[in-house]
Image (cartoon, rainbow, N blue to C red):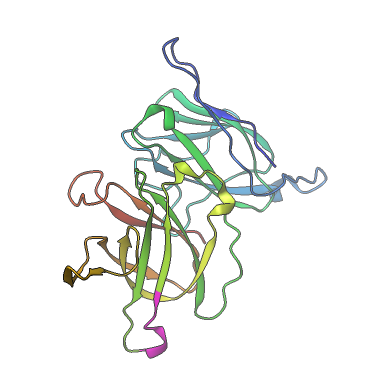
């Protein structure tokens, strides 16, 4: 199902409207005879739009969030990014202050859980959003699911390497490779971002550009790790699925736009 195009409202004659197409991940369904209290969907918003102030998500003119989302933040509470709405076709707006920045129709399925990412690449014309349905496969024993997204602007594809640090349990001492993937703005098809199964545990995480292994060549017999960036620890819990994403600019370790890995527990 294709949602109506989201557009940037025309704030002045000098601003050209930009429309994008967002692919829905499931058909809208609603049983009119169902108990209205059960006819709910669950929606979370993550703000990854550089240089943009706090954002509010309005559905049919009503704010969904209790407070606006600041840059790098996800709505909801710790361990639960979702706010509750009615499952129906909805007029959705992304608002900064009192100004609508994006507007269009959305369709949320009864009982469905959705992650909305609002992003840009330091260019007003690139301000956009992508919607995911968080329907990962069932978790079993020591296995759970993560969805990796690259919101670090630029043309270079980046992946991540997760090294399990639980050395006390031999079968958990494994390595997981994901990517590399381009900045999400280059591929707005939600179905291209699938969940990856991982073991629970504590991981040390590295971002890489083109290869998951340090470079070596005949002219420089030593290992070159310049394609790596250490992102620090990440804990994966057996009862939780995650969105994990790159944010900021590669090589920056100090500014507000520092390169980092962020995680959002989904349930």
Residue 123's quadrant in the figure? top left
Left or right: 58 as drawn, with respect to 73: right
Judge whether residue 117 can be spotted in this image: no
Q: Residue at x 17, y 68 (%)?
A: 219
Q: Magenta stretch: residue 171 in it? A: yes
Quick one: which residue is furthest to the front in this view?
218
Foreground residue, 205 or 202? 205
Judge whether residue 31 can be spotted in this image: yes
- The N terminus: image quadrant: top right
Residue 21: % across, % down: 58, 35
From the viewer's perspective, is residue 9 above or below residue 140? Answer: above
Q: Residue at x 55, y 53 (%)?
A: 192
Stretch of the chain drawn in magenta = 169-175
Left or right: 36 as drawn, with respect to 223: right
Residue 104: % across, % down: 59, 30
Residue 263: % across, % down: 39, 58
Q: Residue at x 31, y 79 (%)?
A: 165
Q: Residue at x 51, y 76 (%)?
A: 143
């Amino acid at each position: 199902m294709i949602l109506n195009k989201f557009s940037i409202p025309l704030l002045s004659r000098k601003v050209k409207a930009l429309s994008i197409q967002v692919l829905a991940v499931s058909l809208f369904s609603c049983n009119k005879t169902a108990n209205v209290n059960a006819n709910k969907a669950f929606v979370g918003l993550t703000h990854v739009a550089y240089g943009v102030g706090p954002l509010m998500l309005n559905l049919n003119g009503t704010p969904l969030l209790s407070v606006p989302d600041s840059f790098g933040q996800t709505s909801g509470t710790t361990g639960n990014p979702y706010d509750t709405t009615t499952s129906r076709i909805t007029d959705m707006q992304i608002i900064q202050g009192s100004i609508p920045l994006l507007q269009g129709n959305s369709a949320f399925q009864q009982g469905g859980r959705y992650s909305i990412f609002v992003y840009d690449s330091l260019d007003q014309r690139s301000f956009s959003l992508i919607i995911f349905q968080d329907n990962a496969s069932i978790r079993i024993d020591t296995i759970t699911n993560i969805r990796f997204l690259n919101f670090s602007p630029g043309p270079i594809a980046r992946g991540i390497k997760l090294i399990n640090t639980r050395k006390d349990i031999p079968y958990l001492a494994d390595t997981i490779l994901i990517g590399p993937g381009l900045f999400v703005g280059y591929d707005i098809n939600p179905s291209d971002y699938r969940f990856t199964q991982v073991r629970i545990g504590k991981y040390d995480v590295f971002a890489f550009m083109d290869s998951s292994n340090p470079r070596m060549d005949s002219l420089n017999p030593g290992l070159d790790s310049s394609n790596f960036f250490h992102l620090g620890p990440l804990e994966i819990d057996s009862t939780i699925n995650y969105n994990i994403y790159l944010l900021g600019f590669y090589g920056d370790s100090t500014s507000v736009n520092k390169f980092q890995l962020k995680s959002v527990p989904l349930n």
